Amino acid sequence: VLRCLGIPTRVITNFNSAHDRNINLSIDKYIDISGKTLHLTEDSVWNFHVWNESWFIRRDLGSFYDGWQVLDATPQERSKGIYQCGPASTRAIKEGDVNLDYDSSFVFAAVNADYVTWIHYSNKRKERIYSDTKKIGKFISTKAVGTNFRVDVTDNYKYPEVKEISFTISYSQYKNSLMDDRKILVTAL
């Protein structure tokens, strides 16, 4: 419909798409002490989810948020009392502006939530045992114009994931670094 009105619109597919029911920006998995999955949350990760993007000028949010806007024609959650999602600015999602209207926090979680595993003890205590910050929001894609090739638009939604660098230092180097930290602390006092 938006294309018929002359508004640029495209289909977007997000792989490993988070469905964050409680909007805490994480997908929480609970296990008991034996490793058995407990169903204590309605959060989930979908193999993929599809939505639309349309190009809008955002006078309501300011020109910083102009450009591609997420519109989900198949929302699974209510937003302001009705089933709707968007228009959420992809710029807001990338910048982490999750407090804006139009479901930016929900879309942010869909592409960038942390996947957190907790041990739930019988006494209602829980302990975080694992957090994966790279699992959600992979190969966010649209179809190329005039061909059947995929165009990766992940960079429109999130900054590149930081790669972990491993290195080793000797114990004496570690000990010396602690001494340096102590000198800074004493000097500051």
Image: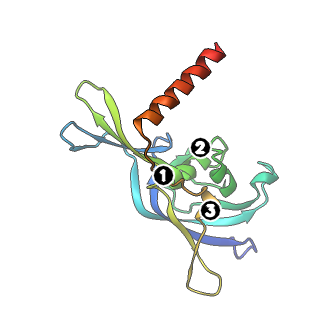
Circle 1 crowding by C-alpha within 10 Å: few under 14, some 14–19, many from 20:
few
Question: Could you say where residue 179 lies in the image, as x and y percent from the top left?
Answer: 52, 24
Question: Could you say where residue 93 lies in the image, as x and y percent from the top left?
Answer: 63, 52
Q: Nearer the viewer, mark 2 or mark 3?
A: 3
Name the residue located 40 percent from the left edge and 55 percent from the top edge. 45
Of labels 1 and 2, earlier in sequence is: 2
* Tag of residue 155: 3
Q: Which residue is mark 2?
A: 80
- Residues under labels 2 and 3: Cα distance? 29 Å
Q: Taking the image as drawn, is residue 154 in sight?
A: yes
- What amino acid type should be assigned to the residue bearing mark 1? Glu
- What amino acid type should be assigned to the residue bearing mark 2? Lys
Q: Residue furthest top?
A: 189
Pick the front one: 48 or 33: 33
Of labels 2 and 3, earlier in sequence is: 2
Q: Taking the image as drawn, is residue 13 in sight?
A: no
Are discs 1 and 3 less than 8 Å apart at CB?
A: no
Q: Which residue is mark 1?
A: 164
In the image: residue 114, left or right of residue 149: left
Name the residue located 57 percent from the left edge and 50 percent from the top edge. 108
Q: Quadrant of residue 184?
A: top right
Q: Residue furthest bottom?
A: 147
